[in-house]
Image (spheres, rainbow, N blue to C red):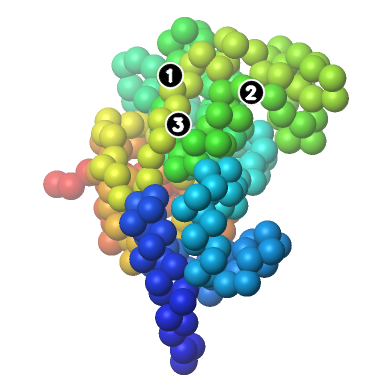
């Protein structure tokens, strides 16, 4: 049994008061290891003096939030799953609904996922009909998303026709078109604390829940389910399959895709 570190416990309490983020909802060993590595790299001896520095230095605090939220993404991440989305999930939802789909990219990071969704949907709808809601805890990441400038490597999985149509070269980088950017609404949101918006046909929350405790994940599953329309679909990451999805009013549709069960 791991002994409790009182300095880390104090750090968690103080941080929650400072930025309203509860580290108790994250996997303990994983998060403590990440923070210990970060404070050491920045030259701090322990949690106490690191927290004092976070209080006084907004740039250091932004760096901490960015590191804590693990902003690693790319366009069409896990390509096979995006092909299932294009070939099966979106056509089925489109056939079920009368108008354009309402989609939420939860934990959208630097924008690759919501912009990927817009580009995929552009193969089914006119761009002006497409609206994707995107949320993240990290305002710095969303600022980068709004700028829309990416490395060539991040577009490796993107179909070449979409890359040619919606990106232009900007030095060694690629800039996404305003036509795509204008279809995404970004909002700061803490999935562990904030109330969830409602009425979505598809919700994507990928590669973020692996960092949370089982209790936190179960609460999120219930809230995501409540945010979906009847027969809506919940799309998770490749290491985040839901054990006993029926417990949360879901059924497995395809691997990594869960359909909301309608109660009789």
Left/right placement of residue 261 relative to residue 175 reads left
Residue 145 lies, with reference to residue 219, above or below; the image says above
Q: Residue furthest left?
A: 264
Tell me how far mark 3 sits from mark 1, CA to CA: 10 Å
Quadrant in the picture for residue 140: top right
At 62% across and 72% down in the image, what residue appears? Answer: 45
The residue that disc 3 covers is 134
Residue 123 spot, x, y in % from top left: 57, 17
Q: Which quadrant holds residue 200?
A: top left
Residue at figure coordinates x 56%, y 52% from the top left: 64
Is residue 235 at least partly visible in the picture?
no
Q: Residue furthest right?
A: 172
Q: Is residue 156 left or right of residue 92?
A: right
Number of residues whose C-alpha sits closer than 10 Å to that of mark 3, classed few (under 14), some (14–19) or many (20 or more): many
196 to the left or right of 132: left
Write down the residue under mark 2. 148
Q: Secondary structure at mark 3?
A: strand
Q: Residue furthest bottom?
A: 1
Q: Residue at x 51, y 13 (%)?
A: 182
Q: Position of residue 15 (x, y in %)?
A: 41, 59
Depth check: give the residue in front, 247 or 207.
207
Q: Is residue 107 above or below residue 86?
A: below
- The reply to whether callout 3 and callout 2 are in contact (CB within 8 Å) is no
Frontmost residue, 230 versus 139: 139
SS under mark 2: loop
Q: Which mark is residue 131?
A: 1
For mark 2, does the 10 Å Cα neighbourhood hold few (<14), some (14 to 19), or many (20 or more) residues? many
Considering the numbered disc 1 on the image, is that residue within a helix, a strand or a loop?
strand
Do tag 1 and tag 2 residues touch (Cβ < 8 Å)? no
First of labels 3, 2 by sequence position: 3
Question: Which of the two marks, 3 or 2, is nearer to us in this view?
Answer: 2
């Amino acid at each position: 049994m791991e002994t409790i570190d009182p300095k880390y416990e104090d750090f968690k309490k103080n941080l929650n008061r400072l930025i309203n983020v509860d580290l108790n909802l994250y996997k303990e060993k994983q998060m403590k290891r990440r923070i210990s590595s970060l404070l050491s790299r920045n030259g701090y001896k322990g949690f106490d003096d690191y927290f004092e520095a976070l209080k006084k230095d907004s740039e250091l605090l932004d760096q901490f939030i960015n590191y804590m939220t693990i902003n690693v993404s790319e366009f069409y991440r896990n390509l096979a799953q995006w092909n299932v989305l294009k070939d099966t999930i979106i056509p089925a939802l489109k056939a079920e609904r009368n108008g354009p789909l309402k989609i939420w990219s939860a934990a959208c990071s630097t924008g690759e996922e919501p912009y990927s969704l817009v580009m995929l949907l552009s193969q089914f709808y006119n761009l002006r009909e497409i609206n994707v809601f995107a949320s993240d805890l990290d305002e710095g990441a969303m600022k980068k998303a709004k700028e829309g400038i990416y490395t060539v490597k991040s577009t490796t999985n993107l179909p070449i026709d979409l890359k040619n149509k919606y990106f232009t070269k900007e030095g060694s980088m690629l800039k996404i078109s305003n036509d795509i950017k204008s279809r995404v609404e970004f909002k700061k949101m803490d999935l562990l604390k904030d109330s969830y918006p409602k009425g979505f046909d598809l919700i994507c929350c990928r590669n973020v829940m692996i960092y949370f405790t089982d209790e936190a994940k179960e609460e999120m599953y219930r809230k995501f389910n409540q945010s979906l329309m009847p027969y809506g679909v919940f799309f998770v990451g490749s290491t985040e399959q839901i054990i006993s999805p029926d417990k949360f009013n879901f059924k497995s549709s395809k691997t990594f895709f869960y359909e909301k069960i309608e109660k009789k």
